Image (cartoon, rainbow, N blue to C red):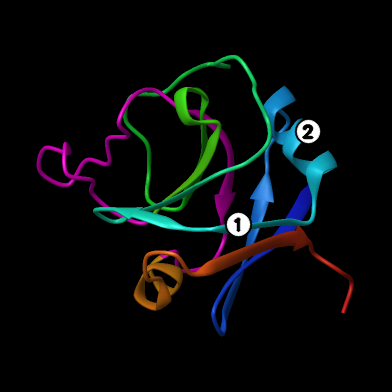
Amino acid sequence: MKRIRIRIGTTEIKAELNETRTANAIWRMLPIKARINLWGEEIYFAIPLSLAQEAGQAVVHKGDLGYWPPGNAICIFCGPTPISTGNEIRPASAVTVFGRIIEDAMRLKEEATEGMEIVIREEDDG
């Protein structure tokens, strides 16, 4: 299992990547640094990677990591978005889920403000 660390400000959490082609492509890009955008309880940011949809999902779960092909963006789903109904978490359009946060995703959202830097790197053994 490939594990990563995601940091925004002083908050850092762990996540695991799944076995999709998308996860493998993102793993090869690490470390990733970008500036975040917020959309409801979703954190997203563009990366220099253009991939086709892989088993797209129109509804995701809290803590899912998704790749959004129309924006070449990584999305971190911490809760409902502006187009969600009830407690569902609905991306702007289908995403490829390539991993999952294994800690409390809301810790990231609580620290995040528009334009902050996000850093994603391989988890080290320490």
For the image, the number of numbered tags is 2
Residue 124 at x, y percent in the picture: 86, 69
Residue 48 at x, y percent in the picture: 68, 36
For label 1, count other residues whose C-alpha is less than 10 Å away and answer few (under 14), some (14-19) or many (20+). Answer: some
SS assignment at label 2: helix
For label 2, count other residues whose C-alpha is less than 10 Å away and answer few (under 14), some (14-19) or many (20+). Answer: some
Residue type of the residue flagged with mark 2: Asn
Q: Nearer the viewer, residue 93 or 50?
A: 50
Q: Please tell me which of labels 2 and 1 falls first in the chain.
A: 2
Q: CA distance from mark 2 to mark 1?
A: 19 Å
Left or right? Give the position of 90 relative to 33. Answer: left
Residue that appears at 64% across and 20% down: 51
Residue type of the residue flagged with mark 1: Ala
Compared to residue 88, the image places residue 31 above or below, namely below
Q: Which residue is mark 1?
A: 34
Residue 22 at x, y percent in the picture: 68, 28
Q: Which residue is mark 2?
A: 24
Q: Nearer the viewer, residue 109 or 88?
A: 109
What segment is highlighted magenta in the picture?
78-105
